[in-house]
Image (spheres, helix red, strand yellow):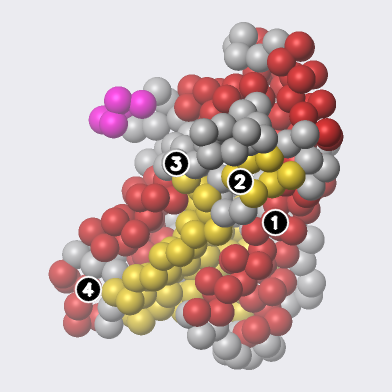
Amino acid sequence: MCAANGVQPPQAYLLPNSSPAAVERLTLLSRIFDPASEAALERTGVTRGWNCWEVGAGQGGLARWLKARVGAEGSVLATDLDPSITDVRSGIEVRRHDVTQDPAPGNGFDLVHTRLLLCHLPGRELVVDQLIGALKPGGWLVVEDFDGVSMPPDRRYGPHETPLATHAALQALFRRRGVEGRTGRWLPAMMRARGMSEIHAEGRVFMALERSVYAHFHRLTVDQVKDDLMKARLLTEADYAASMTALENDFLAPTPLLWSVIGRRPAAAADSKGIRP
């Protein structure tokens, strides 16, 4: 992260697309959160002829959803730091792009969307500026990210809620690597500070149970970084085994809160009031 913010420089991304578990993990992530993302995108009125940029496209599922909405008259650009697993249909342009280093691939988008990207990035506020600058006047920005801090399992509210050692270890490792677990909570204020209009923010959270899609997603996430957790002495084999047993037999916990935040770039006459290009 930026030294000015007192955060250590970023290290390699902990959950790369090149990992053997990445495809299955991202598939589960889509099953869990695509309904929230699609609802947020629908609120913008996305329709035929729109020009869209999907940032951090992953497997490309939301890029395909957007292409179905904009039709042949519209366009969808899907970018990712590693687009090797981005599976898209014809008519969608796929590009490798590092949003922290590379200039925006245009500045006339009707819609820019990203999900669960900003929390991992150094200089995330500068990235928000870039995404806004890529919009045409009147264009929409939809940013979705976690607040994974505000709703931990708490047995005061239910004796079966299950704090996992693996969950605490993941949070500690992510903090060490500069991941900000409250990014979603800050998004509305980020957009307001940049002069965005028609801001709308809502969150999705649910209680996950043993052997659920979310339980499997958590297992895959832990397995993808297990070596890092062990090397950092944040997790023991005994704690790992206990957590995996709980996920299969007796687990109840709220998922991270996913904030879906929408804002609109004002018309050109209002740009001088705070939106940075």
Q: Which comes sooner in the sequence, label 3 or label 4?
A: 3
Q: Main secondary structure of the magenta part?
A: helix
Q: Determine the CA span between mark 3 and mark 4.
A: 34 Å
Q: What whole-number distance in Å separates the C-alpha atoms at marks 4 and 2?
A: 38 Å
Disc 1 residue type? Answer: Ile
Residue of label 2: 255
Image mark for residue 150: 3
- Circles 2 and 1 in contact, beta carbons < 8 Å: yes
Task: Please say whether residue 4 is one of the residues in the magenta stretch.
Answer: yes
Q: For the residue carrying disc 4, how many other residues have a C-alpha within 10 Å: few (<14), some (14-19), or many (20+)? A: some
Specify start and end residues of the magenta stretch as a single range: 3-7
Mark 2 Cα shell of 10 Å, populated few (<14), some (14-19), many (≥20):
many
Mark 2 to mark 1: distance in Å? 10 Å
Residue indicated by mark 1: 32
Which kind of residue does numbered mark 2 sit on? Thr
Q: Is residue 143 above or below residue 137?
A: above
Residue 95 at x, y percent in the picture? 64, 59
Eyeballing the image, is 85 above or below 22?
below
Distance Cα–Cα, label 1 vs label 3: 19 Å
Give the percent coordinates (x, y) of residue 43: 50, 79
* Amino acid at the residue labelled 3: Ser
Screen quadrant of the C terminus? bottom left
Task: Give SS at disc 4.
Answer: helix
Give the farthest residue toward the left.
273
> Disc 4 or 2, which lies upstream in sequence?
2
